C-alpha cells in the first residue's frame, strides 16, 4: 500500500507542478488513516471483563482487602493476689492483637466500687494516648493512636496500662472486662479500618486481708481466727544462681488439722509464688530480709 502511494506521487510530480502543493496534505491524510487502523487493531485485541469493559494490557486484578480475624485478647493481671488492707494494689492491663495492626483499644472494667476505689493509672505504651473514665460500676480505659505515631502498632501480650486501686473492705474483689462479641459499646480492639478484632477477654480477682511477718519455727495465731501459721522452711539461693529456686514451706493449723503449703519461685522456668488455699483462706508469701517471709492471708 505504501509503495503504491509512492508511485502515484511520482506520477503527479511528472505530469503537473501544480499537484506538488497537495503532496504534504496527501501524506498527512495517509498517516492519519494508518494510525486509526493501528488503534482499532490494538483495541480489538484487548480482553474484556464480564461487564464488557476492556482491561489493561497487564490484565491486573484488584488487590483483595486483608482478612480481619477477631481473635485479639485483653487480660487483667494483678501484681499480687493477696493484699494487705492498708496497701494500694496494682493491676496490669495486657493486650494482644495477634499480629494485626491496631489503632486503639477500649477496655470496660467492672468492679464493686464499694470494695475498691480507683486511684491512678500509668500508660505503658509509646504510640497510644490513654484516657480513663470513672463509672458508677467501674472504669473505662481508652487508648488512641497518637497522630504523630509513624510505626505500625502490633501488640503481643504487651502491658498497655497499670491501674492502681485502694481497697475499701477485706475479702475478694472481682475485676471483669465487659465484652460480648458483636457489641460496639463494650470492650474492643480497633484496627486502622475501624474494625473490632477483640475475640476474648479475661478479668481477675484479688483478696484483701492482712500481712504477717514469719520467722522459722515461730508460730503465729491469726487475730480473730482459729488459724495458726508456722514457717517451717525457707531456702533462698545465692543471688548469683539465676536458675536456683526459692522454697518456702508453711504449716497452717485449724484446730487439730494441719496442712503444709509449699511455695516455689525462680528456677529455669522463672516461676512465681502461687496463691495457696487452706481452710477457706488464701495465702501468698513475699520474701523479706533476715530469714523471714511476709505471709498475706485473706478469707475466700
Image (cartoon, grey):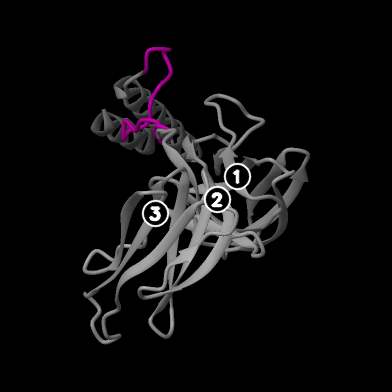
The image quarter in which residue 27 lies: top left
Question: Which residue is at a point 38% across and 33% down the rendered structure image?
Answer: 12
> Which marked residue is nearer to the observer: mark 3 or mark 2?
3
Part of the protein shown in magenta: 49-66
Tag 2 or tag 3, which sits nearer the N-term? 2
Q: Is residue 31 above or below residue 230?
A: above
Local crowd size for mark 2, using a 10 Å CA cut-off: few (<14), some (14–19), many (≥20): many
Q: Is 55 colored magenta in this rendering?
A: yes
Residue wearing tag 3: 253
Closer to the camera in the image, 204 or 260? 260
Q: Which mark is residue 268?
A: none
Q: In terms of secondary structure, where does tag 3 sit?
A: strand
Q: Among all residues in the image, which is located at the extreme top?
A: 51
Question: Which residue is at a point 48% across and 50% down the rendered structure image?
Answer: 95
Tag 1 or tag 3, which sits nearer the N-term? 1
Whole-angstrom CA distance, mark 3 to mark 1, is 26 Å
Q: In terms of secondary structure, where does tag 1 sit?
A: strand
Amino acid at each position: 500500500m505504501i509503495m503504491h502511494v509512492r508511485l502515484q506521487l511520482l506520477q503527479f510530480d511528472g505530469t503537473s507542478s501544480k499537484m506538488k502543493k497537495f503532496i504534504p496534505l496527501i501524506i498527512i491524510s495517509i498517516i492519519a488513516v494508518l494510525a486509526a487502523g493501528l488503534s482499532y487493531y490494538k483495541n480489538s485485541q484487548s480482553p474484556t471483563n464480564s461487564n464488557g469493559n476492556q482491561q489493561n494490557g497487564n490484565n491486573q486484578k484488584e488487590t483483595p482487602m486483608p482478612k480481619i480475624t477477631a481473635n485479639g485478647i485483653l487480660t487483667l493481671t494483678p501484681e499480687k493476689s493477696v493484699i494487705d488492707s492498708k496497701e494500694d494494689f496494682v493491676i496490669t492491663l495486657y493486650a494482644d492483637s495477634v499480629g494485626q495492626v491496631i489503632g486503639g483499644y477500649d477496655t470496660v472494667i467492672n468492679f464493686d466500687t464499694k470494695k475498691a476505689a480507683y486511684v491512678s493509672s500509668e500508660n505503658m505504651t509509646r504510640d497510644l494516648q490513654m484516657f480513663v473514665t470513672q463509672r458508677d460500676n467501674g472504669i473505662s480505659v481508652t487508648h488512641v493512636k497518637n497522630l504523630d505515631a509513624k510505626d505500625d502498632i502490633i501488640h503481643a501480650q504487651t502491658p498497655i496500662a497499670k491501674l492502681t486501686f485502694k481497697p475499701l473492705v477485706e475479702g475478694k474483689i472481682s475485676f471483669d472486662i465487659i465484652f460480648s462479641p458483636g457489641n460496639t459499646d463494650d470492650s474492643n480492639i480497633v484496627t486502622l479500618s475501624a474494625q473490632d478484632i477483640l475475640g476474648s477477654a479475661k478479668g481477675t480477682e484479688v483478696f484483701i486481708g492482712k500481712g504477717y511477718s514469719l520467722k522459722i519455727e515461730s508460730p503465729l495465731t491469726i487475730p480473730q481466727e482459729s488459724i495458726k501459721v508456722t514457717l517451717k522452711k525457707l531456702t533462698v539461693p545465692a543471688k548469683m544462681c539465676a536458675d536456683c529456686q526459692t522454697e518456702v514451706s508453711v504449716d497452717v493449723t485449724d484446730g487439730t488439722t494441719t496442712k503444709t503449703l509449699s511455695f516455689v519461685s525462680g528456677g529455669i522456668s522463672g516461676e512465681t509464688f502461687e496463691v495457696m488455699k487452706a481452710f477457706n483462706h488464701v495465702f501468698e508469701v513475699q520474701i523479706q530480709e533476715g530469714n523471714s517471709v511476709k505471709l498475706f492471708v485473706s478469707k475466700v
